[in-house]
Amino acid sequence: MRQIRSAVNRLIGRAGYGHDHPVIAVTCVLLAAALIAEYMARATADASSTVSVQHLALVLVMLVGLIGGMFRPRWFLWAALVAGEMLMLAMPMITPLAVIITCTGFLAYLDTWSGAIATGMLLISTTFGVEPSSGRLLVATLQNLAFYCFPLVTGLLLHMMRQRDHDSYLLRRQQEREDTARDLHDTISNDLAYLILRIDHAETNGMPNSEPEYRQQLRELRDAADRTMTHTHEVIESLEEHVEQQPQSQPSEPRITSTLPLAPDADRAAVQQAELQSLIDDEETKLESLGFTGDNLLGELRRPLSFDVMRLLTGLLTELYANIAKHADPAEWYAVSIGFNAEETRISVSDTIAEHDGKLGLGSGLDRYRTIIETTNGSFAIRTEQRHWQLDVCIPSRP
């Protein structure tokens, strides 16, 4: 169904205009052509009973309704429906019957109440000419109820499917915006904050005594700016990928391909252990360049973490180290501890809040991670006593 809709969209787009309901437009064209052909055939065969002002007017109204339904189906399909019912009562034809059934289904697809009203009108119109006391009224009503409720039920089912796809699309877009906001905060925002802190630190300490130290300081600042530029390009590429994948109906999935053979658990755990240790070493080096001193403890990872948990853990650690750089006192000790067991991953961070906090950032980074972790049945607790700041996080191994 989705492939047919896409093909019809391309066909109508090449014709020179866009349309919200291409299937309805094509169906209206086919029904209009069939109506003209059938009426001309009947007029040729029996002109005396077919060609009349009343019949011709009803046919024209149906044609106007079908043609207008190509562009404004919510309004013009009613004209085709009513005219088709009147024409069926005056002169039974095959195409008007197809028109009223199709219009009922389309109106139910577009709006639930419109479909119910259209079905009620069909049922009432089919009882005309049947004597109430003849006993045929009940039989005719039951037959028509079974026949004319089919387009209503079909339209309602399609309406529910369209609403589900629309809700899924909105949820997917919301998830993409949240992921982009988190990526921007965790990479570019934190990199820029570190760059500002390095500049402030260099300004406070004054010029280095020797030229090699001065050049080393410039290289470190350039490396920080280069990381920011790299992360900016990655975010831009990610946004471009979202735009290209927007017509797809499936939500974004982790970038893991099932065709690649999975390494043994021990090897995967070792790789993840090395990645975490490398991240901690890099962040520790950044903090040392700003004058911080502290402990960084990483427990032994015996079992590999899932992709989602690993991604969440690395992002959270990056955010925590950035918060230490932005809000902690460099003259005081800080500590970061990461431990693993079969059920969960625990992270503990403690530092001392700086007396003059520069308030770099919006302060929303940890709030995002709190929402994610608590949604996965984890725990996220922050305690502040005077200037001491303590964070304890528990991430389930199988969220």
Image (cartoon, rainbow, N blue to C red):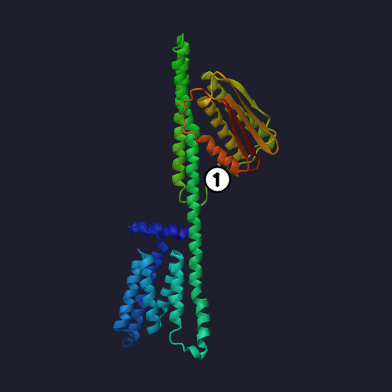
- Which sits in the foreground, 308 or 289? 289
Amino acid type shown at disc 1: Glu
Residue 189 at x, y = what percent? 46, 31
Looking at the image, can residue 21 be seen? yes
**396 is higher (above) or lower (below) than 45:** above
Q: Position of residue 3 (x, y in %)?
A: 47, 58
Disc 1 element:
loop
Q: In the image, residue 107 lies at what x, y percent?
A: 43, 68
The residue closer to the viewer here, 189 or 227, is 189
Residue placed furthest toward the front: 386
Residue 342: image quadrant is top right
The quarter of the displayed image where residue 44 is located: bottom left
At x 50%, y 77%, the residue is 147
Residue, far bottom: 134
> Looking at the picture, does residue 369 appear above or below residue 173?
above
Q: Residue at 46% across / 87% down in the picture?
A: 130
